[in-house]
Image: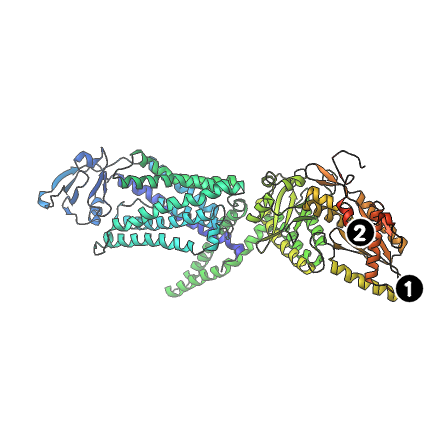
Amino acid sequence: MIDRTNGPLVRGVFACAATLVVLALLVLHVHLALDSADRRLGVLFATADRVVIDEVTPDGPAATAGLQAGDRVVQVGANPIESAGDFDLAAEAFERGDPVTLRVVRGDDAQRDRALELSVMPGMPVGWLGLSINGLVVLISLALCLLAVLQRGDDVRARLIAWFSFLLALELALPAPGTPPLVVDILASSGFYLATGAQLSIVLHLAAVVPERRPLLQRRPWLVPIAYVVCLGAALLVTCTFWIEVVGGKTWLPWTLLEAEAPLFDILFNAVAVAVPALLLPPAVRHPDLACRQQAGLIFFGILPWTVYTLAGSAADLVGTDLPLWTDELFSLIPLSLPIAVFVAIFRYQLFDIELVVRRSVLYTLLTTLLIAVFYSVAGLLGALVARGVDDARRSMWIVAGAMFFAGLTFGTLRRRLQRWIDHRLYPERQALRRHLIELASELPALGTVPAMGEHLVERLRSIFAVSSATLLLAESEHGVLLSIAASPAESLDGSPLSFLVPPDDPGVQRLRLLGRPLPMATLLDDSSALAQRFAQRDAALAVPLMAHDQMIGLLVLGSPESRRRFAREEIELLSLVGHQAATAFENVRLFESATFEGLTGLRRREAILEHLDREIERALRYGRPLVVGMADLDHFKSINDRFGHLAGDAVLKRVADELVAGLRSSDAVGRYGGEEFLLVLPETDADGGWHVADKLRQQIAKLTLPMPESRRVEPSISIGLAALDAAAENADRQSLVEAADRALYRAKQLGRDRVELAGAEVSQDAEVSQDEASANEVPVSEVKEPGTEPT
């Protein structure tokens, strides 16, 4: 089994060998074309019976001698002609300028003794234009094959393009069918039939996976093998019929060669000519990614000339006419359209990666080929020198074979060492990059918590790739909203804290989820208002989706590299792998934390914070230590939701939760009690100390300024009620503490909000209104302002 690290090398060796074979065939094609031009008569024989003239070239030797379409050749010189093979054998003796006598039967007269005798002077002009175009298409196809075959082994598009290009080059490099000698004609015709069937199935498959695999193939994967079976089966049927009729000279089949060619050249050609554009047109018009639309559009227009020519030829046959003569010249240019379109799709719109080919795989292939030649030459030379001293010929043969066998056993080790040497000597930065990323992947799970993992990830990636910034967003488990978890640097360019969210139905997020691979931010910002709002001024260059089990659980946004204008293709590929590994690590940690921490704010859930409070109460009562419990509530939160929507409200909750966590000690705890309420647990803290901690939190939150849509902003505030544990009281339990803190919070609300109150003070009768009524009547004048206005 081939190791994936050696895959490009092995594929490169095979590609070079195939290239040499095709080039050899092309040289043979040109040689035979020049040689056959001296023997050609300017006639085209019918497909079913090649000794019946189907077409006569105007002004050619046959036309000058008086041959006509429909004439049946029965004798060449003194040689009777019974089959196409007889004519081909006779044609091998033709020479330019040496007249040849043909006996032909014309019309319904089947008597050989009444046949016409015509003298024909062999020799046709060499079609240099056709040979040049044919050679150009072969060379372009070989280049495209080499680019595609050295791509990643898991890219089905590259494999299909490699096979199609190779078969196209092979088909055009083969000598033209009908070229003497007979054995060349037989092999060329057979290769033409089989290559045609394979190309039809491959181009159909390629249209179904460019720019990406169609959902229909994912639901019904058996459609692909069926297409291959049908196309290759039709080609094999024609090939077998050709061998039986032409090679064997038998006609016992219930169908003729012409009838066998009908399914391949009529039915399948027209079906594929219609199906391929039909598969490419929808993504070329409607795909959400501009680059993918351009890829599909280029392949569509590349295959369109062949489609038009095929359908036009079929339509002409149906009405009993022929296409104009100028279409024959056009047909020689048609094979150029698809390779050129694919080249443009690769180089201009990144159909697949070619940078690795240029930088690595070609170098591996060339050096390995040189190693093979040197190694086996030395081994063979040493074996021959040793064998020279042995008199027994059989023993000398075994010595040479043993030397070559030993060379084969040790070659793999030498090749791997050569590859490692190339990696370490010529690409040390790539080795260092891989090493850093492997270390990063192993470090993340050990950090244990999502915030710590997020901070470490963005800091390390910013350092490894030398980018201006790195931002991590993770999808909230309940609604899928992308929340900012960590950023490096921690503040945006304008100095305001970076804390925001992106809705899951954002067009940019949908595109990343659909493609599942890194994309330039420039292609996303035009369609994504949420991403543009935060990243347009942050020098964002690349968006990397974090994919786990075909689900997008987060988004990593990297700024521009400091030393170059764009990311290298290999860096993007490595970042994609890092995204998958990080996604798995985050998903595992979040599954562990899901029972304890809630997704939006990252704080403890209600049940978890109450359990923590029970443990702290038990410890405080046992050891006689102080404890303060606080109930915090966002002011005017209902108005924020009503005015800006629940996504904006969630963003405010997330940012306030971050400030609460940042303002507490490591021994303190905070959890989301419900809605916009938070429960604070402050162990080893008396009432006075708790008031100072709570007031510090209140002041920090009062300094926040959170941007909102339409150039608005929110300046949130918070009210906090505190209750200290009284060990002497009979009701020193969780319920009494929480209720006391809630009453203190209610008092803070009644006294104007944005304040801290301790439990124990009475609420005046005039101020006793329900909290629901107070919330319903809130008008957040000071919390929501136009840009540039001062707080009221």
- Looking at this view, is 174 or 192 the one in front? 192
Label 1 sits on what residue type?
Ala
- Decide if residue 256 is on the left or right side of residue 496: left
Q: Secondary structure at mark 1?
A: loop
Rendered location of residue 293, percent (x, y): 50, 41
From this viewpoint, is residue 94 visible?
A: no
Label 2 sits on what residue type?
Ala
How many discs appear? 2
Q: Which mark is residue 728?
A: 1
Q: Residue at x 34, y 51 (%)?
A: 194
Q: CA distance from mark 1 to mark 2?
A: 26 Å
- Looking at this view, is 105 or 35 the one in front? 105
Q: Residue furthest front?
A: 766
List the residue tagged with mark 2.
Answer: 632
Q: Secondary structure at mark 2?
A: strand
Is residue 340 shown above or below 678?
Answer: above
Q: Residue at x 48, y 49 (%)?
A: 214
Q: Residue at x 87, y 67 (%)?
A: 622
Rendered location of residue 213, percent (x, y): 49, 50
- Looking at this view, is 251 or 394 the one in front? 251
- Which part of the image, by quadrant, shows the C terminus? top right
From this viewpoint, is residue 291 visible?
A: yes
